[in-house]
Image (spheres, helix red, strand yellow):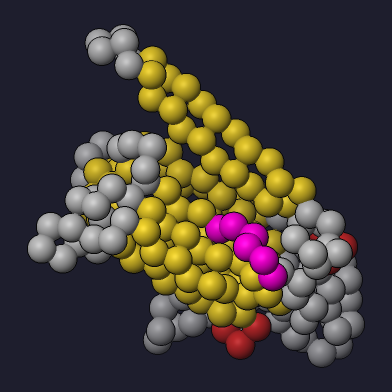
Amino acid sequence: PGTGIARWVGSATSNHVSNSSNITDTVSGTFHCTPRARFTGGQTDEMRFEDFRDYDVFNNQEDGDVAVDRERVYMLSGIRGKMQGLGERAWLGHAELDPDPTRYFLRSLVGELFADVIGFGMLYPSASGMTYYSESSNGDDYYAPLLTQNGTHDGEFEVTMGPLESTFCFLTEISGRFDGGREHIQIVANNHHWQLKVRAAPDKEVRGRARCVYYNQ
């Protein structure tokens, strides 16, 4: 969108036909890909290998450490299962009293819920011991809630995030009631900024969080 930066955009759609009702349920998604060469550090351009994790719960909640240090920053890369309200939640972040570990929280009140996670980062410079991308000062967090008041809400919530030319943004929380084509949480490229968009039917509550980190550390 006018920035001169190469990116790839893809989409995926899945259809499932219910045997009992013969109704087709459709799930779709869009993703942006950024070249690894965009990520640079003051003394290194070498990326760490990606760290892939997956978590699941069944009518329960679970929390713990994804990593005990900040060698990588972690994002939600996928979620599967029923999501019937704010009782269903997948979240990644840091505790206020102990900000070094990356924490996860997964909860479902209506069956099984799965969350997929990817972590990435850069190698430490050999001498300075700097931590790239995951320090709180090296990024910004954004929150987009659609919560009902008197049983309804406006149907859409948008937050303008970091500039396209200098930041990389990703989801850190997905929560709410997703049972139709109107419910979605997405990060989109709009003009010269990333945007976090949350949309739902007026009687359904949905909540999303995202984080943006700077390519050049």
**Quadrant (top left/top right/bottom left/bottom right) for the C terminus:** bottom right
Instruction: Give the magenta range.
Output: 187-192
Q: As displayed, is residue 15 above or below residue 68?
A: above
Q: Can residue 64 be seen in this view?
A: no
Per the picture, the main secondary structure of the magenta-coloured stretch is: strand
Residue pictured at 37% horizontal, 43% vertical:
182
Of residues 104 and 182, the one drawn nearer to the viewer in this rendering: 182
Picture quadrant of residue 62: bottom left
Residue 84 visible to the viewer = yes
Q: In this view, does 85 lie to the left or right of 133?
A: left
Q: Quadrant of residue 131?
A: bottom right
189 in magenta: yes
Could you say where residue 106 lies in the image, as x and y percent from the top left? 36, 54
Q: Is residue 43 above or below residue 174?
A: below
Please name whichever residue, 75 or 193, is drawn nearer the observer in this view of the structure. 193
Q: Which residue is drawn at 33% across and 50% down?
A: 200
Depicted 215 relative to depicted 138: above or below? above
In the picture provided, is 52 more to the left or to the right than 86? Answer: right
Residue 108 is situated, as x and y percent measured from the top left of the image, at 27, 47
Which residue of the protein is positioned furthest toward the left in this rendering? Answer: 150
Q: Tell me: 35 left or right of 60.
A: right
